[in-house]
Image: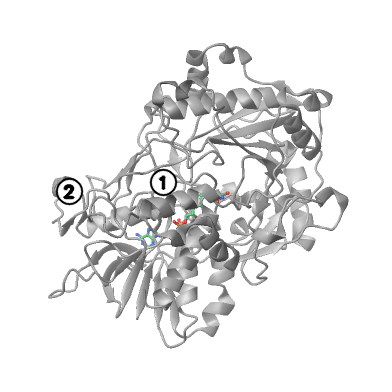
Amino acid sequence: YDYIVVGGGSAGSIIASRLSENSSVSVLVIEGGPSHEGEVDLTIPYVYPRTFRSRFDWNYTTVPQPNLGNRPGIYLRGHVLGGSSSINGMTLNRAPASDWDKIASYTGDSSFRWDAILPYIKKNEGFNRPPNTPEYANTYDPAVHGFNADKIGNTLVTDGNWISQPALQAATEVGINYVRDVNGGLPVGISWQQFSTKDGSRSSAATAYLSAGILSSRTNLKVLLNAFVTRLLPVSGTDLKFTTVEYKDASGNTVTVSARREVILSAGVMSTPIILMRSGLGPRAHLQANNITTILDVPAVGQNLQDRCGAAAVWSVNATDTDDDIDRNPAVFNRWLNQWNQNHTGRLTQMSYRQMIFGRVPNNASIFSGGFQDPSSGPTCPHYELYPANKWTSPTTPQPATGNFVSMNIFVSASNVRGTVTLDPTNPLTGNPVIDPKYLSSEWDRYVMRDAVRTSVRYFNAPAWKKWNATPVFDTAILNSDAALDAWISSSAFGGVHGVGTARMGPANSPAGQDVVAPNFKVKGVSGLRIADTSVFPFVINGHTMGATYAIAEKVSDLIKSGN
Ligand SMILES: Cc1cc2nc3c(=O)[nH]c(=O)nc-3n(C[C@H](O)[C@H](O)[C@H](O)COP(=O)(O)OP(=O)(O)OC[C@H]3O[C@@H](n4cnc5c(N)ncnc54)[C@H](O)[C@@H]3O)c2cc1C
């Protein structure tokens, strides 16, 4: 093979598909999980949580998190073709423009600026216009979307559910501005949700880029499934040319395969650093402790993990049309399932969120006194994200058997915490990564979370919710002191799914070790190897990560195709 792509996930599927558009090059994808084809839990959008802790998930767990009541968290990652894009929540979101500009500034490469990255964002998008009715006037900006019908679908929420009216009105009442398009680069405010769906079904990197049709029509593209990559090997006699891949096939046999040109490592934020470390590319002391010979001391591998910690607060409402009964009453679920089976319409075509709010801690907040530097990418970058849901969403308290609810899902966005991913000392060669995101371990992250919870309470206290009698199901006395609020957060918060940074990109001339890859995605200090997945983002993405990952996958494909 000319190119071997390790991991057929969100980035890997796109890269393999794009490279194999040239029929004169051959491409192999080595994917640890099974195929996505024909799997109903990967197809019906609403049921996506069924994939958690299933054979489509790598079943990772974090180490106990002191600021989450010492609870370990599950860390979901897709173990299937399409990777996490095959099991995720489908919120299609890009990083704000200022995040891209910050990446450009950090790497010294202006081709990461928002204006330069937007064509790559559009390239993989098949935006589905909403109905041409007054309700959806001014709900999106066509100028920032791609309309490539064969690529990844992006669908605006369009079901007219009751919650949209109070959700939007309450925002106006508490001073949250309306944003026409969450994906226009300036997301702070309230906007309509966009989901990566198409014709009522999930649209993923696999459905769009490695569909059965594409795979059967390209003899130069091969996908190996259920093959677990253990490490990369340097070609002997070369200057650290890492073009050989070692994997265990479905029967457990160890096999090696080499690329004539390059290996592209796209195993995701947890596996990419682990594969590098097993290959002798990582922090020397850690490799030594795990009896792995260091080939290149790269201290940044597995460091700089940034993620977005979440929590959910719940209010009871007197509305009857919430999604609660879909989750707890099989008859209601089956009614919607029948509808979905008939024509792919109805409640199961999307999740329980219609709007999303990106917010900022006020400029005069006490945290900024004393010279504290705002870690966000600038004044138009969110510090936190909120999305109201028309059902009970708290994962830390069970859904009651009766009643109707709305919830606020709350995420710290512009985190300044950096965690780690390291080898399992009991089984460095095939064990799961040891994941320590260090959630809420900085005063800044805790401050943002408190501010976001208080904003949520203000929001559901707004007059728009009075008609629905929105009543918190938690004791609002927690708001009276930071200590009480921290205690509630500690017991309610949960880990994120938007990890980045474990093989981060840096300037072309920064030392190998400080950063792992150069702006052309090549691994510093070795040859024949690039990394392209969420692990390369140098900072947390202030939004959901899938869209940003798609954009860099398109960009790296172009770089490789043009010989750069
Ligand atoms: C449950 C969940 C919900 C999420 N919700 C959203 C959302 O709503 N919106 C959003 O934007 N983002 C969401 N995300 C995050 C987003 O999906 C990911 O950040 C992004 O898809 C990661 O892309 P990636 O290419 O880096 O990794 P992945 O897509 O995870 O791809 C990595 C691939 O490598 C394979 N692999 C890993 N290790 C090996 C190995 N050793 N050998 C062989 N193959 C291997 C995996 O099986 C996988 O296919 C969610 C993620 C999860 C898990």
Q: Residue furthest right?
A: 134
Q: Residues within 10 Å of mark 1 (few under 14, many from 20)?
A: many
Amino acid type shown at disc 1: Phe
- In percent of width and height, residue 331 lies at 76, 44
Q: Quadrant of residue 313?
A: top right
Q: Name which of mark 1 and mark 2 comes first in the sequence.
A: 2
CA gap, disc 1 and disc 2: 28 Å
- In percent of width and height, residue 489 lies at 51, 24
| Disc marking residue 290 | 2
- Please determine whether, in this image, residue 543 is positioned above or below residue 398: below
- In percent of width and height, residue 423 lies at 26, 48
Horizontal relation, residue 264 to residue 160: left or right: left
Which quadrant of the rendered structure holds the C terminus?
A: bottom left
Q: How many marks?
A: 2
- In percent of width and height, residue 132 lies at 85, 58
Q: Residues within 10 Å of mark 2 (few under 14, many from 20)?
A: some
* Beta carbon of the mark 2 residue lies under 8 A of ligand 1: no
- Please determine whether, in this image, residue 41 is positioned above or below residue 241: above
Q: Label 2, secondary structure: give it.
A: loop
Q: Is residue 19 visible?
A: yes
- Please give the residue where the numbered disc 1 appears in the rendered image: 539
Amino acid type shown at disc 2: Asn
